[in-house]
């Protein structure tokens, strides 16, 4: 899923539900979010925290989520908050690294994380 335009909190807080709906409708449980071309991505710390919480609340370990974010504003706060609440996600600056992580055959599959 490629995201373009500018960062807006109200859009991004809804992304976990959009991702979950798309995964269920397509029968896939690995998602790559390509946001490296987004503008105005220096999100406030509190936004990053709440988005991480929402990712964990909606997706948990049901979806393996890789997010590519512009390197100038990359922090691991959203990832840390989500992962600490049982989400299966990682953030990257390079799309190829994200794809490699998503397709790693040795990794635990979504939904098996806490069995």
Image: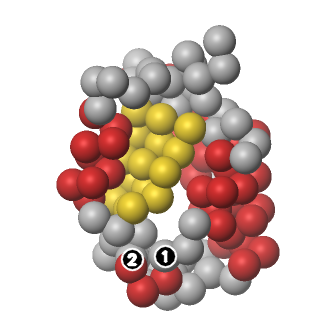
Give 8 or 94, whichever is nearer the viewer. Answer: 94
Instruction: Name the residue at 39% across, 77% down.
Output: 70
Q: Nearer the viewer, residue 13 or 95?
A: 95
Mark yes or no: residue 2 visible. no
Residue 44 higher or lower than 99, as above or below: below
* 63 lies left or right of 32: right
Judging by the rendered image, the residue that carries numbered circle 2 is: 70
- Helix, strand or loop status at disc 2: loop
Place of residue 69 in the rendered image (x, y in percent of width and height, measured from the top left): 42, 69
* Circle 1 residue: 74
Count residues near mark 1 (Cα–Cα under 10 Å), then give few for <14, some for 14-19, many for 20+.
Answer: some
Q: CA distance from mark 1 to mark 2?
A: 6 Å
Give percent across and percent down for residue 77: 65, 67
Tell me: 102 left or right of 21: left
Residue 17's mark? none
Q: Is residue 57 above or below residue 97?
A: above
- In the image, what residue occupies the spot 49% across and 83% down? 73
Work out whether 5 lies above or below 53. Answer: below
Q: Which colour style is shown?
A: secondary structure
* Residue 52 quadrant: bottom right
Horizontal side, residue 95 vs residue 87: left or right = left
Residue 56 locus on image (x, y percent): 70, 42
Is the C terminus in the top left, top right, bottom left or bottom right quadrant? top right
Q: How many marks?
A: 2
In the orientation shown, which residue stands out farthest toward the top? Answer: 115
Residue 109, given in percent of the width and then of the height, sits at 45, 21
């Amino acid at each position: 899923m490629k995201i373009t335009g500018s960062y807006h909190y109200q859009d991004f807080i809804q992304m976990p539900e959009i991702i979950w709906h798309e995964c269920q409708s397509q029968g896939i449980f690995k998602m790559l979010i390509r946001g490296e071309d987004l503008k105005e991505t220096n999100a406030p710390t509190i936004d990053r925290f709440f988005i991480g919480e929402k990712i964990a609340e909606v997706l948990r370990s049901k979806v393996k989520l890789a997010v590519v974010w512009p390197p100038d504003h990359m922090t691991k706060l959203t990832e840390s908050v989500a992962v600490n609440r049982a989400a299966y996600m990682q953030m990257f600056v390079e799309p190829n690294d994200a794809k490699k992580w998503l397709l790693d055959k040795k990794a635990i599959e979504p939904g098996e994380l806490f069995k």
